[in-house]
Image (cartoon, coloured by chain):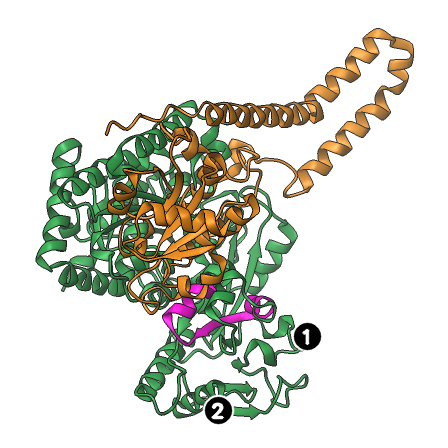
Chain colours: A green, B orange
Amino acid sequence: MRRDGLSALVAGDRPEVGRLAGALERAGVNVRRATGAVPAEDDSERPRDIVVAASTDLPAAATAPGLAGRLWLPAVGLPSDLELLVAAPAALVDAAPLARWVLCPSERVRGLVDAGLAAVAKRTVVLPLGTEDEPGAGDLDAAVAALLDRTFPATPWPGRTRPLRVVVAGHALHFLDAITEWLRGVDDVELRIDHVTSFARHDEAASAAHVEWADTVLCEWASPVAAWYSRHKRPGQRLVVRLHRAELYSSWWHDIDIEAVDQVVCVSGHYARLTRETTGWPAEKVVVIPNYVDSAVLDRPKLAGAPFTLGMMGVTPRRKRLDLALDLTERLQAADPRFSLHVKSQFAWDLPWAWRDPEERAAAEQVLRRVRGVPALADGVVFDAYGPDVGAWLRKVGWVVSLSDDESFHLAPAEGMASGAVPLIRPWPGAETIYDRRWIASADEGAGLVEELADRVLAGARDGTWDALRSEAQRQARRSFDVVAVCERFARVLVEDLEPAAAEFPVRAG
Amino acid sequence: MDVPTPPVLDAADLARRLRETEAELARVTLRLRRLEDSTSVQVARLLRGVAKNPRKGLADLPHAAARIARRRRGRRARPDSSSPTVRERGPATRGTGTPRAGAPAEPAAQRLPDRLLAASAVLVTTRDRPVLAVVADEVARQRWGDEAHVQPLRPDDALAVLATVLPDVLVVDAAAGRDGPWSGLGTYEVPERDRTVLDLLRAARDRGVPAVLVRGSGPEEVPMLADTRNLFSAEVAPDAAIADLVAAGRGAA
């Protein structure tokens, strides 16, 4: 990983900040310390890679866009837990949007920060910044080293004469957030974003300028924008297109000149096969890179009741099959009233497209009537607020369910696995190309499915095998879906052709 | 002793219908406004004007048509100007993460709690015994249920239920966080539960409802409830009789 040449500016007099400065130095980072607030003028020749300062040491003048993405923000000097529960302090609220990482001294503070500052819920980590006398000073060094490795990856293409110029194009790039952030941390990459107006419209002059500049163009959607790039790319320029399920069942991909595309990226072997069958595109161009999860954010200590808690993320549209999750919860509650189901989702009434569908409306109303009408479910099902604080929410979840009729990937099991929960997956088409078969039920429907899953849960919770199962699930998630592993695969596809999609994703290996 | 079954709360049902009617009215109004604003309706009105008064209408037609075209171009140029069409909406995103921009399907701010409340078959209504709204597990609820009407509060609709029932006392049992729907309550480890209880205490205070804390085994187990003791009207021991619990609440009130 890249450590040499990294530089950090550490500002402030707080002891926790001083300890972090020491750990950075021991990790090989060139640290300049500044007493007091972040100086307005930085005397380095190029911007420091890291700026460490507590929110109270960031005067308004320094709270500037220039710090964005470089600020490691220690959550220290905060008010009491109760005050933090009521509201995050204004200084932290102001500084947080700039932070690459918000460094929390404990899991409790991290949860409170996540709850109060939704915008940073995917950027909080715990660093043991406690007193030096406490055991754990070595833990701080290890945690800082891991965070440096996570933030500043080694150059994936050593030996280049100049940085690789990459353009990422698309109207909605949230699926690629971590990829673009990772690319920004790579030394030998210059990254530009062609954030186009909509799925079908873009500023052609701006895109043409990107074509002139880039070595590689990555189109996030197989959209009319990707079609434009396929018709206007320069000879020898690399073009990679990500294709999602929605495009596959539309006519959007028809206008893409596949001859001009180097690789088409799908999220699973199943969808790669469907893509080849539907489009007739050359098999060697269709490759698989799975969706990613961020273990740095999701891997947190489980709460005491986790072995008895199911979690379900996303229940709309109705093909997600919340009704099956309720069947399972009823069955488990009958065996042991400690079991509960926690749901984190938007509902049909939150989504105009779903609310327009009478069947979606009816299904949503029916499921609520059932939850409140059946005593076992009234106390056994909790609907939690929808939001980005998935890492904190998963602390209470020991089993994460994926019971849909159909999915292209379904990130929820991967997120649950990364958090240390055990996945319970219905055999929806293609699930076996993403997830290990050991997590997938053999029965597809009805009582057989519910019984099979209930038996797994009861055995795991009662026999103490839950811990072993979740460790294995977490290990698989790190190897297959963690953002670092996925980014390294993305780094390859930006410069070279990947092997064609295999029948099953190699999550089962090992 | 036979405990009379509380009847369905008519007021809650009426309130639900009213809310749904208001929501539907808001939706229809919005749709009507969009329809009236649409290019098709604008053109139709223009042509009707021409038909009614050809001399004036024809004279105005080029300017009016140009104005409609400009409005249409302006709307299309603004990225957030209208809901995308099905063709242009692009793929839907998954259900967790940052909420997407765009108009919600319903205007109500508290859709889930209201709908859960509407789906609840029975709420406490009669006042022949003390009415307690409780954050507690089923064992405690059953214990208190012999001498009081006990309305369970659950994390996802607690505020809506409290507002509807308007109890004599709000009871928060420190043991509620050991497992069940309130698992983690009082520990700061599940902030959403602690926040809900803070909101309940605030709502109870605003409505003049006394709040009683049933103490747990120790403040270290539920530090958040220990920190908020001064927000409660009174405290009772875990094994307090229902009469003591109600008296503590009423005495404080």
Q: Position of residue A457 (x, y in %)?
A: 15, 49
**Relative to A370, residue B234 above or below:** below
Q: Nearer the viewer, residue B87 or B6?
A: B6
Q: Chain of mark 1?
A: A
Q: How many marks?
A: 2
Please say if A98 is above or below A141: above
Kind of residue at badge 1: Ala
In depth, the one of B237 and A61 nearer the eye is: B237
First in sequence: mark 1 or mark 2? Answer: 2
Specify the quadrant of the image occupied by residue A144. bottom left
Determine the residue positioned at 55% across, 89% down: A13
Residue A30, disc:
2
Residue A60, which numbered label? 1
Side of A126 relative to A467 (left or right):
right
Prevailing secondary structure of the magenta residues: helix
Q: Quadrant of the C terminus of chain A?
A: bottom left
Q: Nearer the viewer, residue B156 or A286?
A: B156
Stretch in magenta? A93-113
Q: Is A405 situated left or right of B250 in this image?
A: left
